[in-house]
Image (cartoon, rainbow, N blue to C red):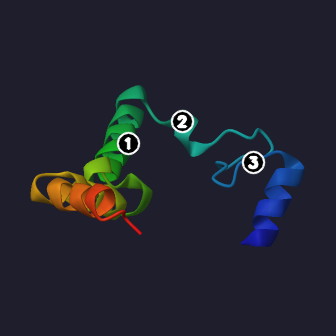
């Protein structure tokens, strides 16, 4: 696989080049516009369905949740008392 990629880079062709790799036209360019639009929509939908890693919504991040837990509601009162009334250290 790595050798194929290196060869493609050296030749200036795409890895998914069509039947004539010398032209460098990919199979994507030969698809009709509605098919390309449907493919892009499908990829977008798969990305939006992801709920892990860098694609996780901001409010579901564990660090953000921990901060909100400390600073929200009774947690804010407890954190404030700890930091300001007891010296915090």
Q: Determine whether, in the image, residue 56 is placed left or right of residue 75.
A: right
- For discs 3 and 1, the disc positioned in front in the rendered view: 1
Residue 68 in sight from this viewpoint: yes
Image quarter where the C terminus lies is bottom left
Q: Is residue 5 above or below residue 18?
A: below
Image quarter where the N terminus lies is bottom right
Element at label 2: helix
Distance of mark 3 from mark 1, alpha carbons? Answer: 23 Å
- Mark 3 crowd level (few <14, some 14–19, many ≥20, 10 Å Cα): some
In-front residue for pair 53/59: 59
- Mark 2 crowd level (few <14, some 14–19, many ≥20, 10 Å Cα): few
Element at label 3: loop
Q: Position of residue 33 (x, y in %)?
A: 41, 27
Q: Position of residue 7 (x, y in %)?
A: 85, 60
Quadrant assignment, res 78: bottom left
Q: Residue at x 63, y 53 (%)?
A: 16
Q: Determine whether, in the image, residue 9 is placed left or right of residue 71.
A: right
Q: Which label sits on residue 39?
A: 1
Are discs 2 and 3 less than 8 Å apart at CB?
A: no
Which residue is label 2 attached to? Answer: 30
In-front residue for pair 64/82: 82
**Label 2 vs 3, first from the N-terminus:** 3
Q: Residue at x 76, y 62 (%)?
A: 5
């Amino acid at each position: 696989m790595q050798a194929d990629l290196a060869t493609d880079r050296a030749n200036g062709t795409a890895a998914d080049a069509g039947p004539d790799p010398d032209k460098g036209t990919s199979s994507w360019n030969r698809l009709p516009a509605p098919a390309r639009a449907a493919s892009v929509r499908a990829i977008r939908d798969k990305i939006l369905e992801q709920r892990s890693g860098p694609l996780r919504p901001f409010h579901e991040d564990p660090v953000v949740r921990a901060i909100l837990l400390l600073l929200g509601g009774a947690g804010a009162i407890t954190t404030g008392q700890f930091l300001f009334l007891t010296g915090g250290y």
